[in-house]
Amino acid sequence: MRTILSLLFFVLFSTQSLWAQDTALVMSYNLLQFPGDNPERIADLKAIVHEVKPDVLMVCELQTNEASVTILTQALNTNGVGYYQRAPFLDNGDFNNMLYYNTKKYKLLKQDTVSGWPRFATVYQLIHKGALAAGDSVVSTFIMVHLKAGDTDAAARAKMAKHIRWYIDNETNGQNIFLAGDFNLYSPTEGAFQTFINKGKYPLNDPINEIGEWSNNEYYAPIHTQSTRTEYFGGGSTGGLDDRFDFILTSKDVLDGTHSINYLLGSYKAFGNDGNHFNQSVNFKTNEVVSAEIADHLHEMSDHLPVIMRVVIDFTNAVAPQPLSQITLRSYNQTLLVNGAEDWQTVELYNLQGQQIAVLNNAGRLSNMEIPLNGFSGMVLAKFSNAQQMQVFRVLVR
């Protein structure tokens, strides 16, 4: 039975329009069993996040759901800021993960876990709201992991890494992946690290390409993330900064910008590490990259330093919405018929999560085109292209 679907097409991009651009700061932080016996550390975290101003904050070693709310209400959404939100809390014992995000820039699409031992990894999929409003779809997948600690536990880390590798290869499209957390690695030759960077369909990359024998090696002093302390207090490790345990690895497209997100060169940092504190506490004497106050907050908050990086998000800039035309399309057997398509070589349909619904190659430059709907209804992005130009439309199917 044939039905008539009314679709409203709004021009969102052409080769004559401008690309819009945004930036986002991604931060990963081991919070040292927060709140533990010292919930007053929330004041330290508050100072740190207001200094960094992350758009995406991933944390591990979070003890309770209540603690995750405390971070949101007493650290992030303070001092006149009110735009942060958190993902739903997933209880994994005393060592939990959480993602916080800037709601002015991101919307949470999906949350998942990757099973393993001694704790599962958490997966969060965010869509960029600015791109979405402009008719584009820029989706990122953030995976937070806390691998088994201990210099004799490399096999346990490698086993968990295989679970994560399977998930990336089979449950994602390999695009705009950020794998972050406390890897507890003592060497890049460990099976876990090799599984991340050299195995599977979608190998990951170190944005700064500083791969070497990091542990207790002064050459890598600027990228060490543990320990911020030389004296024991409040749990955690001591010994000063001499290990690179904390990472943000990315898929290759983040480094070359092929899927709208591009690492900003030089922005990857072990925040608070000036390279001059090898085997010293982060607040020993003068710190060249943060104030003495922030160095003290980093020292008190955790035995780990946070890792940060900034990315640039490119998306199509919406022209003032103007109806191209009101088009009536016939639909039968979950197929759309388009008239007047002879000027276009290819038509692609995407949902607002960036997943391709359908694609049709119009190499013969037919006037009438058939586009399978596959049962989809709602808002889609329709990309029309030929050798000279491209246009993207937002399409409301109702």
Image (spheres, rainbow, N blue to C red):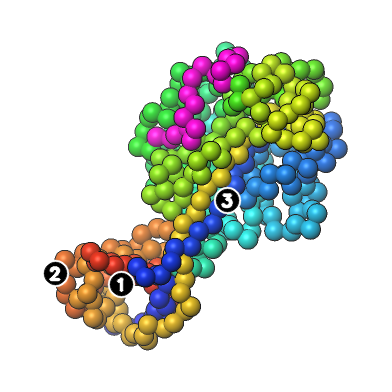
At label 2, the amino acid type is Gly
Instruction: Please check the rendered image and state whether residue 205 is part of the magenta-colored stretch, yes or no.
Output: yes
Q: Which residue is mark 3?
A: 24
Look at 46% across and 47% down and name the residue there. 262
Q: Nearer the viewer, residue 249 or 257?
A: 257
Q: Nearer the viewer, residue 165 or 226?
A: 226
At label 1, the amino acid type is Gln
Look at 16% across and 66% down and name the residue there. 363
Crowdedness near tag 1: few (<14), some (14–19) or many (≥20) residues, C-alpha within 10 Å: few
Q: Which mark is residue 364?
A: 2
Q: Looking at the image, tell me whether mark 3 or mark 2 is earlier in sequence order.
A: 3
The magenta region covers 203-220
329 shown above or below 32: below
Q: Specify the quadrant of the image occupied by residue 398.
A: bottom left
> Which secondary structure class fits the magenta region best?
loop
144 shown above or below 317: above
Q: Is residue 237 left or right of residue 347?
A: right
Q: Looking at the image, tell me whether mark 1 or mark 3 is earlier in sequence order.
A: 3
Q: Which residue is mark 1?
A: 334
At label 3, the amino acid type is Ala
77 shown above or below 186: below
Look at 64% across and 55% down and name the residue there. 102
Mark closer to the observer (1, 2): 2
Look at 86% across and 37% down and name the residue there. 40
